[in-house]
Amino acid sequence: MTALTATDLQHAVEDAAAHLYVWALKDIPQDLRDALAAARERETSPTGRRVLETIHRNVAVADDERNLVCQDTGIAVYHATVGEHFPLHPARIYEALRAGTARATIEHPLRSNAVHTITRERTGPNIGYRLPIVHWEFVADGDALDLKCVPKGSGSENMSFLKMCVPADGVKGVKQFVLESVVGAGGKPCPPGIVGVGIGGSADYAMHLAKEAIMRPVGTRNPDPVVARLEDELYELLNETGIGPMGLGGDVTVLQVHVEHADTHMTLNPVAVNYQCWAARRASARIDADGATHYDRDA
Amino acid sequence: MTTTHELTFPVHDAAEILKLRAGDEVVVQGHVIGIRDRTQTRIFDDGREPPIDLSGALLLHTAPNVRKLDDGSYEKICIGTTTSARMARFTEPLGRRYGVRAICGKGGFPDECIDTMRDLGMVYLAVVGGAAALETTQIEAIEEVAWEDLMPECLWKFRVRDFGPLIVGIDAHGGSLYRDVQERARRKLEELHARL
């Protein structure tokens, strides 16, 4: 057996990125399917039920026709967890993610959404300056790369909000802001979805954490019990607002609330909200040091 | 019990639109015109006349995934609906100047569109956002594409069959589900805040 070169490994990462992007767009994860089915069961508003039944039909049609669940191919966001001994430098990993995103867009073909932020001119096939976006994590000891692709639609991304609460606002201020944000968003982010909340850290890091929160499998809980209780409480409160499926009224406004936190400065109390639509697309893979790729539907 | 209507667009009889009440369900036949942010800034901000007739039309807020074929026509890949609120300001001139009768999108229009739609005899039809795989099966053909340089935000003419279900979000009588839902939610928020 010939030794795996860095170029081979880079190709393996590129292949994984290309596959994950399309897979995520077509085949939503089981935990999300289960959450949508449960929502359909408990919704009592006729309009809300009709919306949730249509969502169910749509997911079935996407499966049968191997089509995209939603037309918005989003901005490609990846989460890359790089093991200390994974033999490909992150600079090359980024090249591979970029190449994989572009390749998937051209080969499928997928709608390209990437434009220059001022001129609005098209840049590349879902790539551009600083696109795709990668959340990096580096772990000691491991020799694999864990990759997750979360194509993020604009309808929900436009419903992102940041508030620098003051410490005296306490966690009550955090809850109020999340409630106001979700009610204000109404039907625009395609509810019922996942409300990602980032608290603590700094302004930019709170929003980063809110995005991390929407990447988690639906219904997972923050390992810190204090934060997990906040997730439960926000979930209950938000589902009392009556916004309902697609903002047309009903019992199910959110499928889940995920909160990620960081410790912060004694005079900071940031809260960021990043909404994820019901079509919370997500697909993952582990790439071993030898280039072997294991796709994972549940990560 | 929900009332369900079947409408074939374009609609030239104002009475057809007046039958619809907020909360009713609609299924659409005939033709739907696809339009988006950039299409509408070209019409209204750049002052270019749309090359496809909009009178009596149902507009759909969309930017589809398509494949261009060798003969210059377009094959559908995945066609879905985008958030309408970004395009609310075009409602009045679309109705007044071009005679548009209905706008289909997702997420709704803000309250300032309610009076406009009542005065001009227009309705807002809510599609289930994100349900694009299903929507694609209801689009029989892409019959015309204008302003290809705006791809994918061109002006599209689709022929549809059993397009829906759509929910009347804003009717031509001053009714809006979005306003009603928001008003109830705001009252609920006061109660929830007191409990925090």
Image: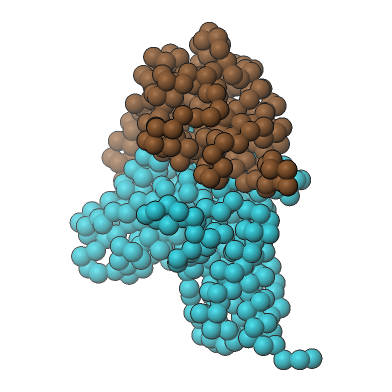
Above or below, A18 against A71 in this view is below
Residue at the image point whose x is 53% and y is 84% from the top: A89
Counting from the top left corner in percent of width and height, residue B48 is at: 44, 32
Q: Quadrant of the N terminus of chain A?
A: bottom right
Residue at the image point whose x is 71% and y is 78% from the top: A292
From this viewpoint, which residue is outermost toward the right?
A1
Counting from the top left corner in percent of width and height, residue B142 is at: 67, 35
Residue at the image point whose x is 49% and y is 55% from the top: A122
Q: Nearer the viewer, residue B83 or A240?
A: B83
Q: Nearer the viewer, residue A173 or B114?
A: B114
Asked whether the viewer can see residue B13, the reply is yes
Q: Nearer the viewer, residue B112 or B42?
A: B42
Above or below, A92 against A162 in this view is below
Counting from the top left corner in percent of width and height, residue A104 is at: 64, 61
Q: How is the image coloured?
A: by chain
Counting from the top left corner in percent of width and height, residue A221 is at: 50, 60
Above or below, A297 against A173 in this view is below
Asked whether the viewer can see residue A254, the reply is no
- Residue B194 appears left or right of B4: left
- Residue A53 appears left or right of B187: right
Q: Quadrant of the C terminus of chain A?
A: bottom right
- Residue B124 appears left or right of B196: right
Residue at the image point whose x is 73% and y is 43% from the top: B71
Q: Supply the letter of whichever chain is brown.
A: B
Q: Colour of chain A?
A: cyan
Above or below, B76 against A211 in this view is above
**Could you tell me how many numbered marks the image carries?**
0
